Image: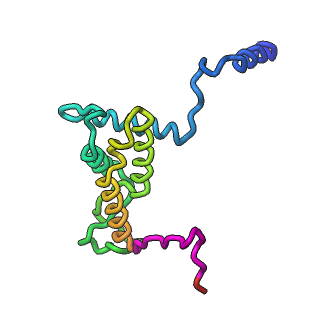
């Protein structure tokens, strides 16, 4: 292709209206779309299939548990000799799970996608109390299994950060 032909092609591309080609999605938007499609496929594969309008927090919890089989985070069980050790010296047979942070981010994306796809905030199954409780339990369990104490962050007083204790 000559430089002239390439120049014409670039000019034609820039003169197209925005509706002619799909906008390039951000990494977040692309991941949100993939997550939404994956969850939709999960619901369709249920026996019997579940429509999005029938979806509730129990379906979301089952989906999160299903995802654990693809996890890459070692979570020591209470009977394991390495339970509570941040860096165990050897391998063990404890299961791999989805990391809490990954699940938390996934739920955030699915919560947004649900509403963007016409769902009401009042009926959003990703925003239910049951999901928040599950995520908190996963976070605490994984922190204990790794020997990292879970501490709530102190709230700021009057909008100002608490002064450091020296």
Image quadrant where residue 22 sits: top right
Q: Position of residue 153 (x, y in %)?
A: 47, 70
In this rendering, the count of numbered labels is: 0
**Among all residues in the image, which is located at the extreme right?**
4
What is the magenta range?
148-164
**Left or right: residue 79 compared with residue 153:** left
Task: Say which residue appears at 31% left-offset and 57% top-offset.
Answer: 134
Q: Position of residue 3 (x, y in %)?
A: 80, 17
**Quadrant, the N terminus:** top right
**Among all residues in the image, which is located at the extreme front?**
158
**Quadrant, the C terminus:** bottom right
**Left or right: residue 42 compared with residue 12:** left
Q: Position of residue 78 (x, y in %)?
A: 26, 71
Examine the rendered structure and indicate whether residue 141 appears above or below residue 84: above
Examine the rendered structure and indicate whether residue 99 appears above or below residue 166: above
Q: Is residue 39 magenta?
A: no
> Can see residue 96?
no
Task: Say which residue appears at 56% left-offset and 34% top-offset.
Answer: 25
Q: Nearer the viewer, residue 90 or 128?
A: 128
Examine the rendered structure and indicate whether residue 34 appears above or below residue 83: above
**Among all residues in the image, which is located at the extreme bottom?**
166
Q: How is the image coloured?
A: rainbow
Task: Say which residue appears at 41% left-offset and 39% top-offset.
Answer: 35
**Left or right: residue 57 compared with residue 98:** left
> Can see residue 151?
yes
Q: Position of residue 109 (x, y in %)?
A: 44, 44
Q: Main secondary structure of the magenta part?
A: loop
């Amino acid at each position: 292709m000559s430089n002239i032909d390439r120049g014409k092609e670039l000019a034609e591309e820039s003169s197209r209206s925005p509706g002619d080609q799909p906008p390039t999605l951000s990494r977040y938007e692309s991941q949100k779309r993939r997550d939404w499609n994956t969850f939709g496929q999960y619901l369709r594969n249920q026996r019997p299939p579940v429509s999005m309008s029938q979806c509730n927090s129990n379906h979301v919890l089952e989906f999160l548990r299903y995802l654990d089989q693809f996890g890459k985070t070692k979570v020591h069980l209470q009977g394991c000799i390495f339970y509570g050790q941040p860096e165990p010296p050897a391998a063990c047979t404890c299961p791999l799970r989805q990391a809490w942070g990954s699940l938390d981010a996934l739920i955030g994306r699915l919560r947004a996608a649900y509403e963007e796809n016409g769902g009401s905030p009042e009926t959003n199954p990703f925003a239910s109390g049951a999901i928040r409780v599950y995520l908190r339990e996963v976070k605490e369990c994984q922190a204990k299994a790794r020997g990292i104490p879970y501490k709530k962050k102190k709230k700021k007083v009057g909008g100002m950060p608490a002064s450091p204790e020296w």
